[in-house]
Amino acid sequence: MQRRAHTPYRTCVVCRTKRPKKDLVRLVLNGHRLVIPDLRQRLSGRGAYVCPTCLDGVSTCKGLSRAFRGRLQGLSPSLLRQTLHLHTELTGCKNTEDPSLCVHKTTTRPRPASGDTAVEDF
């Protein structure tokens, strides 16, 4: 009988959803108590996990302070660059000044099957 491999799950500190560990970004504190990304997930110390889509909300989240037990001083510039890079990669938006202006998902409403679409134009 073959054994199934164990998949470790972690909880995102921003949205509180459980996902496989490999799908999340690990954050740790450096020597100056600044939050830095641990992309290889190998740095020592206490870590917090964040979804790539939730990285832009990490600066306003209380969960990050709770995860590091109040020891953090702020976010490192490398984390902010990582946030902008992942935001651009996920949404395709090049606007780095105000990411809230980007359209994250474009959806179109389906048109009715009837022949009269003049009323349904939007």
Image: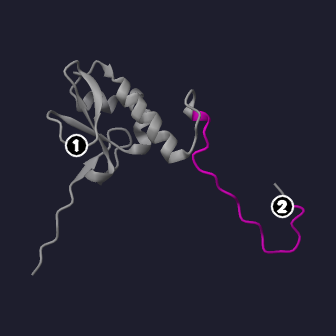
Q: Which residue is mark 2?
A: 120
Q: Is residue 89 above or below residue 27?
A: below
Q: Which residues are magenta?
A: 100-120
Sequence-earlier tag: 1 or 2: 1
Could you tell me the amino acid type at mark 1?
Gln
- Per the image, label 1 sits on a secondary structure element best described as loop
The quadrant of the image that shows the N terminus is bottom left
The amino acid type of the residue labelled 2 equals Glu
Which residue position holds label 1? 41
Q: Where's the C terminus, which quadrant?
A: bottom right
Q: Is residue 105 left or right of residue 38?
A: right
Q: Nearer the viewer, mark 1 or mark 2?
A: 1
Q: Is residue 6 visible?
A: yes
Main secondary-structure element of the magenta-colored stretch:
loop
Give 70 or 82, whichever is nearer the viewer: 82
Q: Which residue occupies the extreme bottom position in the image?
A: 1
In terms of secondary structure, where does tag 2 sit?
Answer: loop
Question: Which residue appears at 83% of the width and 61% of the height?
Answer: 120
Crowding at label 1, few (<14), some or many (≥20) Cα neighbours within 10 Å? some
